[in-house]
Image: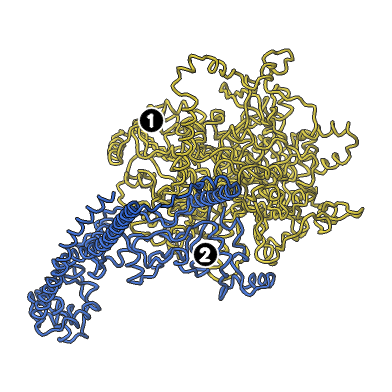
Chain colours: A yellow, B blue
Amino acid sequence: MSSNKKYWKSVEELNENSSIVETLQQNEFVQEIPTDEFLGDKSSLENSSTSRRDFLKYVGFSTAAASLAACEGPVKKSIPYVVQPDRIVPGVANYYATTIADGYDFASVLIKTREGRPIKVENNNLAASNGDANARVHASVLSLYDNSRLQGPKKAGEDISWDVLDKEVGAKLNSLGGKQIVLLTQTFASPSTSKLITEFKAKYQNVKHVVYDAVSQSEALDAYQVMYGERALADYDFEKVNTIVSVAADFLGDWQGGGYDSGYAKGRIPKNGKMSKHIQFESNMSLTGANADKRIPVTPSQQKQVLAALYTYVTGSGSKSSLGADLDAEVVKVAKQIQKAGSNAVVVTGLQDADAQLVVLAINKEIQSKAFNESTPRTIRQGDAKAVAQLVKDMNAGRVGGLLIAGVNPMYTLPNASEFKTGLEKVDVSVAFSMHSDETASECNYIATTPYYLESWGDVELKKGSYSLIQPTIQPLFDTRQFQETLLKWTGNSATYHDYIKSAWTGILGGTSWNQALHDGVLVKPSLPKQGLVEALETPEGDVPTSVDAAAAPVTQGPNLGAAARRLSNAKSNGLELVLYTKTALGDGQQANNPWLQEMPDPITRASWDNYLTVSKADAEQLGLTNENVSNGALNGSYAKVTVDGIEVVAPVIIQPGQAKGSVGLALGYGKSKGFKEEMKVGVNAYPLYKNHNAVQNVSVAAAEGVHEFACVQLHNTLMGRGDIVKETTLEIFNTKDKHDWNAIPEVSKNHIEYEVTSPEVDLWDEFDRSVGHHFNLSVDLNACTGCGACVIACHAENNVPVVGKSEIRRSRDMHWLRIDRYYSSQDSFESDNEKKDNIAGLGSSLSEFSEMENPSDNPQVVFQPVMCQHCNHAPCETVCPVAATSHGRQGQNHMAYNRCVGTRYCGNNCPYKVRRFNWFLYNNNDEFDYNMNNDLGRMVLNPDVVVRSRGVMEKCSMCIQMTQKTILDAKREGRPVKDGEFQTACSAACSSGAMVFGDINDKDSKVAKLKEDDRMYHLLEHVGTKPNVMYHTKVRNTTEA
Amino acid sequence: MKQVKHRNSASKILILGTVFLFTFFNPVFGQDEVAADAVVATEASSGGDVAKGEELFKSLCAACHKRYKKMTGPALFGVADKYEREWLYSWIKNSAAMIASGDAQAVAIFEEYNKTAMNAFPQLTNTDIDNILAYVMVPKAEPVAAAGGAVAGGETDGSGISANVLLAILALVFLMLMVVLFLVNNTLRRFAEANNIELPDSESKTPIWKAFVQNQFLVLVTAILLLLASGYFVYGYFMQVGVDQGYAPIQPIHYSHKIHAGDNKIECKYCHSSARVSKTSGIPSLNVCMNCHKSISEVADATATAEHSKEFYDGEIQKLYKAVGWDEETQKYTGETEPVKWVRIHNLPDFAYFNHSQHVSVAGVECQKCHGPVEEMEVMYQHAPLTMGWCINCHRETNVKVADNKYYEKIHKELSKKYGVDQLTAAQMGGLECGKCHY
C-alpha cells in the first residue's frame, strides 16, 4: 500500500539537521569495531600466544570432536512403575471430572491426564450449567506447574513443619481472650465447607466468617435478597429469549461468574429466518458489546438514566426520563422492542448499584422473562463488601485476635490495602492459606501452603440444586494441605476431607452413588429443600447486608422501586468516569503468573502482556493522548495519570473505538508485585482505584511523561471494505434476498466468460481425489463466535505452542497457531465500508479515502474471526517449499514435517492467510524465554503426543492431526466406523458456543457436511483459489427495529 | 613377534597337558557323585517312587512349596522325619479338617504360616503321597554342580587351546619348509658357482609402479575407482550415524528374553501388555514380574548355561526382590522399593510418532517382525535399524489387515477399486504421508 506517511523512531529523526541521525544512518555499528587497533599493533600480535595456525588447529579439532561426539547417541533410561496403578497405561490418557472453584472462575471440567500428569482441560458435557471452560479455566492446568509456588508451610519466611504450625496456631487461637477470630475467605459455594465452618465456629467462640470477592457483586446480591429473600445472583438462560437488552452487563465475559455464552450463541444462529436481537448500552467496548446487534455507547451515569427510563417505559410507572432527546428516542425504541417480545425479552445490568439491579429484576418480573429462573439462583458469588469494610475497621480497632485468610489476596485487591496492613499488624495471629508468598501471605505470621484445585478434594454448589465435585487429578506436588483439611484438624476432627465430603453428601446424593457422582463430576437435584444454601450463606452477625438506601426495606413490604428509579434518573457525573473491568485473559488476576494467559491477546484491543487505559478518540484528543505505530509496525502509546480521590495510577493509553465519550476504562488484575516471576510483572494495579468496591469512579485524567511500548498482535484495525475476508449481512437481506446478493462467490473471466472461482474450468491445478476415506473440514460460524479466546488457549495446551514474551510479540513473532482477528468498520457498518470502497474513483480519491478507512468509526461494528491454517486443497505453501517439508494428506490436512524443514520461510511468505509461524529461537530450555518450558515443573504440561519444535523451523496448525489419528485408531481397534462428532480438534472441542464444528465431509450425514452446503458458507479469500478446508459462515446482524 | 608367539604357545601346551589330564580323570569323579546321590535317594524313598513323586510335586505342590526353601508353605525336605506318616496322609488330604478338629501340630503350622490354609488334596492316594514324600526327602546335591561347572569350563578352554596349537604346529612346519627351501636354494647356487654355470641376470625392466604411473589411463581409472569407493564408504559412514542397530546395553538386571520368551514360551504381550492399547509397548512394572517370581526365587539347574551359572541367575532374581522390596523370609513386601533404571534400547526421535497398538492390535504384526528373534536373545539388542527407509519399505510391502474390521469396510472397497488391486498396502492406505508419523 503506498502511503506518504513518514515513520520515525525518535523525535530526533524529525530534526533534519541532526548530526546524530546522519551518523546513525550511515553507520551500521554505533561503535567502531576495533579491528585496526588489534591487527595494526604488531607487537601485540606477536606477543599473542595463539598464532593463526594454532587458531585453525583448535577450530579444526573442536569441530571434528564436536561432530564425532554428536554421532554418539545419549543413553536414555526408562523407569517403569514398581507397582503400576490399575487404570494407568503409559501412553493412554485418563480423564477425571472435577471442578474449578477459585472464587472467580467456577466450571465443571474434565482433566486429561497422561501418566498421572494433568495436561489439558476439557469441557464437561454432562454439566448442565457451567460445564464450559473459558480461556482462564483452560489455562489453569499450567498454573498447577507454576514453579513460584510455595513448597511447604512457612512461618515468617522460614520453613516449618505442619505439626509445629498446628501446635503454635492452635495455642494462639485458644488464648485470644475474647477477641474475634475471623475467617476471611473467597466464595467457596461449598456445602461441606459451610458445614465445616459452622463446626469451627462451635469449637472456637466468637468466630466470624467474612466472604470476600475481589471483584465485587455485593450490590447485585443485596438487590436479589431484597427482591427474593435470598442472597444469590439471578440466573438467566439467554437461549430462551429473542430480545436481549444489556446495560453494561458483560455477560459474554465475567459478569456474574460468566458461562452464559453457549446459551446466547445458540440464539444467535439464524434458524428459520429468526435470530435473537441484542442491544447493549455500555461505556467500555466489551466482548458483549462487540457481539451486539446494536451497541449504544453511554457513560455509566447515563446508563443509570437509561435504566430508569426503560423502567418507566416498560412498566408504565416511574419518573420521567431525564435523558437527552437522541438517547431517549433510542430507549423508547428499545422499550417498544421489549414490550413487543414480552416474556421473550430479558434485561440485564452489570452496574454494581443496588437500585440498578432492583430495577432490572423488576422489569424482568414485569415482563415475566422466560430467561430468568427464580428457582435456581447462582451461588458462586457470596462476597459482602460491607462486611469486608467492617473487618478492616475491626482489625484497626484491635478487636480481631485471629485472622485466617483463605483464597483471597486482600493486600493486592483491596483498595484500602494500607489500612488492611496496619490492621493486620494489630492482629495477634494471622494465617494465610495460599499457594504463593503473595502480597497478603508475605505479611501474615504463618503461611499454611495450600494445594491447587487439581490436587484437592472439594464440592461446589454452582447454582441452587446443581452440585459439582472436585477431585484430585495428581498427587500433591508439594508438602501442602488444603484449607478444609486444616480446619478439620483444628476442630479436632480426625476424618480426612474426602471422608468428610462423603458424609456431608449423603443427603445430597439421594439415589445416586458416590462413585457415579464422582465419575460425572456433576449432580443436579432440582427439588432440594430450601436449606443447604441459606445455611451455607450464614450472614455475618450484626451486619445483615442491608442496602445503603431505602430500597432495603424488609422483604415482606417489597422494595420501593419508584424511589430506586428516581435515584437512578438523577445520576450525575462530574468529569470523566472510570469503568474498571476485567479482561478475558486475566480476570481478577489470580492467574497473573500464567504465561499462556499473559500472552493471550485481548479480544478487543489485541494487546497482550498489558493493561491500559481505554480512552475515546475525542477525549484523547482533548487530553493530548496519542497512539502511534512505529516503523516496525509496533504500537506505542502515551501514559496518562489517573486520579481518584488523591490516589494516582499511571497507565498507558489505548485509544479505543467505541469507548463512550466521557468515560475511560482500566482493567483489574494486573500489576501484581509479589510471589511470582519478574517476566510476569506487567501492567498496573488498578485495585487502588476500586473504591468501595465500585467499578465506576469519577476520575481526572492527565497526560503523563513517557511512551509505552505495547505488544499488540493486530495493527490494522478496520476491514477497509475487504468483504472477502469477513462477509456480513443483515437479517432482513438474509431472509429476503438470494444468496448471490449477500454471499456471492467471486468470479473470474476466461475467454470473456465469467466463471465462479470454484469452477474446475478456471482451476490451474489438477484436483486430487478426496472422495475416499475421511476428508476433514472445520467450520467457523461468525454468528456464534463470541471471540472469547478459549480456543486459543486450548490450542496452546494441546499443541505445545511456546510462549515468546512481550518483546517478541512486539516484533510480530507471536507463535499462536490460532488467532482471533478482530475487525472494526470504518463507517457505521461493514456494509457502508464496502460501499465506500466500491465508490472510490481515481487515484486521488483512493489515497484520501483509503487513509480515512484506516480509522475505525466512533462506534464501530465489530467482527471476530478465528483464523488458523486453512488447510488449502491447493496450498500455496506446499509448492514453494524447496525440501517438501510441507505436503498434503488425503484426509485434507496440510502436513508439516518439522524434521524436514530447513527454515527458508518461503511457505510463510506465500501463505495468503499468514498463519505460519517461524521459530526464531529455541523457546524451550532457554533462559532467555523463562516461561513454562524453561523448568522441569512447567514442562510437565507438555502434550507427549506432539513434538516440541526447535529453532529455525516453521510451524502451524496441524488441524490436530494427533487427535484425528487417535480417533481413527480407536475405531480401527474396536473394528467400527467413526461416528459423527467423534472427530474433534482442540479448538472445536473447546468452543462452548458451538461456533466451531469439526468433522468428516465425506460422511454425508455429518453436521459439518451439512454446514458446508449452508447458504451462509464461504471460504476465506475465495478468489485466490486455494480451496481451503476451513469454512466460515457469513455473519448476520439482526438490525430489524420494533 | 614370532618368538613371543612361540613362547606363548609353548606355555599353552603345558597348560593343555594338565587340562588333558584333568579331563580324562574328572568324569569318573562326577559319575561317582551322581551314583552316591542315587543311593541316598533310594534309601530315603522307603518304598516311594522318586520319579512319580517329582511329577506330582511339580503339578500340585510347587506353587506353594519348595524342597529346600521356605515359600508360601514350609520347605518340605525332612518333613517325613518330622511328622508321623499317618498324620501326613490326613494333613495333605484335608488340612482344614485337622485344624478344625484342633490337632495341636496342625494348628501350630497354621499359625506359623499366617493362617494361610493349604489346599485339600483328597484325590491323592497314600501311595501318591509316599511318592511325593520320597521325592521331597531327596537331599540337596550342591557341591557337585559347582565342581562339574568348573570342569566344563576347563574343557572348553582346552578345545580353544588345541586349535591354537594346531595352527602353531602348522606355522612351524611352514617355517621349517621355508628354511629347507632356502638352504636347498643356497646349496644349488653354490653348485652352480662351482660348475661355472652362468646364472641368467634378471633383466632390468621398468618397475611395475613406474609403468603404472606412466599409463595415464590406468591412473585415471584408479583415481575414479578410489573416489567412488571412498564416496561409498563416507556415505555409508554418515548413513549409520544415529542408527543403533545391534545396540545391546548392559542392563541393571540381567533379564534374559531367551529364558522367558524362548524356553518358557511366555507371550510377549503378557508382560508388554500396553502394546495392545497404547503407543508404547511399556516396560513391565515390577508387580508383573512378581506374578511369577513370587514363587520362582531361583532358576532350575537346567537353566544355567556355559556363559551364566545358576548362581548368576539367582543373583539377578535377588536384584528384582530388592527392587520390588520383597522379603523372601517372611514372604511379604517390605514397602522399600528401588525402581529399576532400565537402559532404553529402541529410541525413536521425538519427531517420529509410532504407535504400538496400531501395529500390534490393528495390523496384527508379530513383535518379532521389528524386534527380531527376541526369544533367542540372552541379552536384548536392537534388531531393526529403525530408520525411516526401513519403516517405509514395510509400509510399501505389507497389506492392510482389513478382514473383520468394519472400519476398513467402505474405504477398502473404494480404494482397492481405485487402485485396481485386491489387497491394499499400508502405503496405498495413506501410510506414506508425512503427517501420519510426523506431528
Is residue A753 depicted above or below B100 in this figure? above
Q: Which mark is residue B358?
A: 2
Label 1, secondary structure: give it.
Answer: loop
Look at label 2 and name its amino acid: Gln
Place of residue A172 in the rendered image (x, y in percent of width and height, measured from the top left): 30, 35
The percent coordinates of residue A876 (x first, y second) are 72, 49
Instruction: Identify the residue at horizontal 17%, vertical 85% (top origin).
Output: B128
- Point out the frontmost of discs 1 and 2: 2
The amino acid at mark 1 is Arg
Q: What number is the disc on residue A399?
A: 1
Relative to B185, is A303 on the left or the right? right
The correct choice, above or below, for A876 with respect to A891 in the image is above
The numbered mark 1 sits on a residue in which chain?
Answer: A
Task: List x then y, in percent, for residue B171.
Answer: 29, 58
Q: Is residue A257 above or below residue B255?
A: above
Q: Quadrant of residue A439?
A: top left
Give the residue displayed 80% in from the left and 47% down from the top: A1041
Is residue B100 at all visible to an observer of this figure?
yes
Kindly give the residue lying farthest to the right in the view shown: A752
Give the class, few, some or many, for how many residues have Cα within 10 Å of label 1's Cα (few <14, many ≥20).
some
* Quarter of the image where one finds residue A873: bottom right
Q: How many numbered badges does the structure rendering display?
A: 2
**Nearest the camera: A174 or B378?**
B378
> Closer to the camera, A541 or A681?
A681
Quadrant (top left, top right, bottom left, bottom right) of the N terminus of chain A: top right
